[in-house]
Image: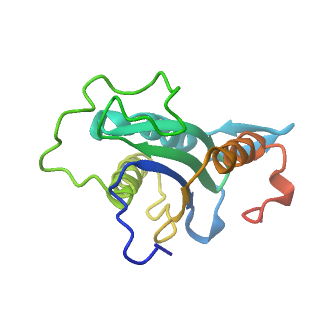
Amino acid sequence: MRLKNYDYAQEGLYFITICCKDKMHFFGEIVDNKMILNDIGQVVEQCWHNIPSHFPNVVLHHFVVMPNHIHGVIEIIFNANHHSFMAKNDNLPQQSKQKIHGTSKTIGSIVRGFKTGVTQWARQNTDIYDIWQRNYHDHIIRNETSYLKICEYIENNPLKWQDDCFYS
């Protein structure tokens, strides 16, 4: 559920969770507390890491693919000199000052593009037609404490898979 009247195109950090339709385990499995990606899982990972090539105003932070969902932190920036509490990040795009014309810059458009890329690959290369649950979960990260807790959660997600609310 999106915050009413919140501009999801503004600079900031966003914790995103995207789930598979019907909690299906499309992306691989957890073995010995490690995520083992199958072909679709590898495509998910590749498409996620390609987001900044389609959205130059995006910096990706922590990310994990799980058997039936993904978690990731997306940062939207428009000024390479922007100093949020994450200003230490060395991955800021060099051309982030440029105006991006013709492309929506909202979290919704970023997630939509990611989901579309994975879906197109799956439809061409597997018998899976509908991968994703409708929509996605988001949390606006407002401070460093929240950011650090979320990053720890993402990093430890495979270790705590059996306790995960998406485990089925």
Report the residue at 18% width, 34% height from top.
98
The relative height of residue 141 versus residue 64 in the rendered view (above or below) is: below
Report the residue at 54% width, 38% height from top.
85
State which quadrant residue 168 falls in.
Answer: bottom right
> Between 37 and 109, which is closer to the camera in this rendering?
109
State which quadrant residue 104 falls in.
Answer: bottom left
> Between 45 and 94, which is closer to the camera in this rendering?
94
The relative height of residue 88 versus residue 128 in the rendered view (above or below) is: above
> Between 60 and 83, which is closer to the camera in this rendering?
83
Q: Is residue 26 visible?
A: no
Colour scheme of this structure image? rainbow
Report the residue at 78% width, 42% height from top.
156
Q: Position of residue 124 (x, y in %)?
A: 36, 49
Q: Is residue 141 visible?
A: yes
Q: Residue furthest left?
A: 101
Q: Residue furthest bottom?
A: 4
Q: Position of residue 19 (x, y in %)?
A: 58, 62
> Between 85 and 111, which is closer to the camera in this rendering?
85
Q: Position of residue 91 (x, y in %)?
A: 45, 24
Q: Position of residue 127 (x, y in %)?
A: 47, 56
State which quadrant residue 123 falls in.
Answer: bottom left
The relative height of residue 20 versus residue 160 in the rendered view (above or below) is: below
* 65 horizontally vs 50: left or right: right
**Total tally of numbered discs in the picture:** 0
